[in-house]
Image (cartoon, rainbow, N blue to C red):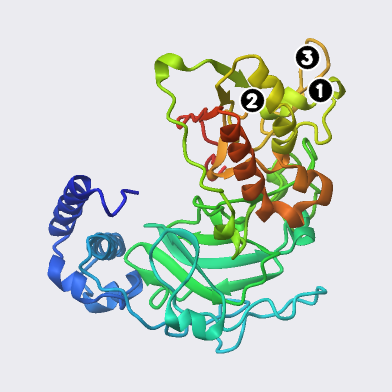
Amino acid sequence: GIPPGNTTNMQELLARWTNRTQRAGIDREAAVSKRLHLHPPKRCLSRSRSLSKAEARASDKAERANATAAHFAGDLASSPSLPRTKSSGDVSWGSSVSKRSEQPGSDGLFEPPFVGQPRPLGPSWLATRAAAAVGKVLNLAIFSDEAEEVHVCLFQSEDLERGTPLAELVLDPEANRTGDIWHVAIPLLREDLFYAFRVTKGGEESGEDEYMLLDPYARAIGSRHRWGQLARQSSEGLPRSFGPCWAQHAAAVPRSSASSFDWEGDRPLGIPMSELVIYELHVRGFTAHESSKVKHPGTYAGLVEKLDYISDLGINAIELMPVHEFNELEYYEIKPANGVYRYNVWGYSTVGFFAPMSRYASCVLSEGLDKTADVVNEFKQMVKECHKRGIEVILDVVFNHTAEGNEQ
């Protein structure tokens, strides 16, 4: 998406959306005036019997696109209150907390949810007076211009390994949607949980509702806690077509105290490019072998143990090969030449651009998936320790290799 502060691009985006709306025969101001009370496609059919199903869907999509653009341009004022939304464990609406499962520890997952806010996208802890009155409130917001129905699926670590959600929160397409952004605010959500989105796409069946989708703005992602660990096969969890190489991925609920990380005044070093002595390295490969003699091999913490050695070599910048979350088993197969299994070692197939690779974190490798949310702080600590030694940190980011795949 385009950041709200990017005025030039936002104006172009608004113009493009306005043209789409005009082609669909929708008045932009009328669409904006609907604010949060946008209708799903079935309501379009009731307003105009002469519209075909495809035309009604296109009309509604253009209407919601206008509202999205208007909101991010500041036309829609943020509401100071947090009205309650509806929650349920199935497709029917209820006034109680999400339906509980029979699994241990499912009680007390969260308090009755609020409608939430459409920005910022991704997970964020609300700091409003209304949120403070009920305690910690996590807001989730995700963009989709194709979704007819969105569920927030919650997992414990053992549920994640089975690929079966502990509970599901069904979002109301009218109350929990602003334009093309779905959102919900969840009070007192347990911070040891993971979340993903079950999305049902409009139109023909696409199969996308057979498994959960990741939040693209996730700060930490859990799937397996050991490098190369195959997923458990389960007839009630992931589809068999997924295979053991694709464990269920889900975003870790961020720590509400994450913003309290002590950077100790750390800032980027700003060493001129002409003075950089760059050492490119692979975080896991650099210390994975026992010859590295580190306490935490193959991790961010293990790299910190070798920083003095790197500094003694005269290096003042390290370029890290991809450290974003990726699936090392994406290309898992036996190489016919030597019979050795092939892994995606380098990581050039990103699953989440905002999440550090969890299997590079000593906290996950030693204590399991329950520590996934702490990966962020371990990564920050590595960067801070580099800067203390006068070493810049450069990340290798490749945007044209991603692992989201398609409906097949």
- Mark 3: amino acid: Pro
How far apart are the alpha carbons under marks 3 and 1? Answer: 31 Å
Q: Is residue 62 left or right of residue 271?
A: left
What kind of element bears circle 3?
loop
Look at the numbered disc 1 and give the secondary structure of its residue.
Answer: helix
What label sits on residue 131 in the rendered view? none
Task: Residue 315: give x, y in percent of width and height.
Answer: 59, 18
The residue at 20%/70% (across/down) is 31
Task: Pick whichever of labels 3 and 1 is earlier in the sequence.
Answer: 1
Question: What is the total number of numbered labels drawn onto the structure image?
Answer: 3
Mark 3 touching mark 1, by CB under 8 A? Answer: no
The one nearer the camera, 330 or 122, is 122
Give the answer, above or below, for where 288 lies relative to 127. above
Residue 194: x %, y % from top left: 66, 61
Horizontal side of 110 relative to 113 (left or right) equals right
Residue 162 location, quadrant: bottom right
Q: Kindly report which numbered mark, 2 or 1, lies closer to the viewer in this rendering.
A: 1
Q: Which residue is mark 2?
A: 346
**Residue type at the position of mark 1:** Ser
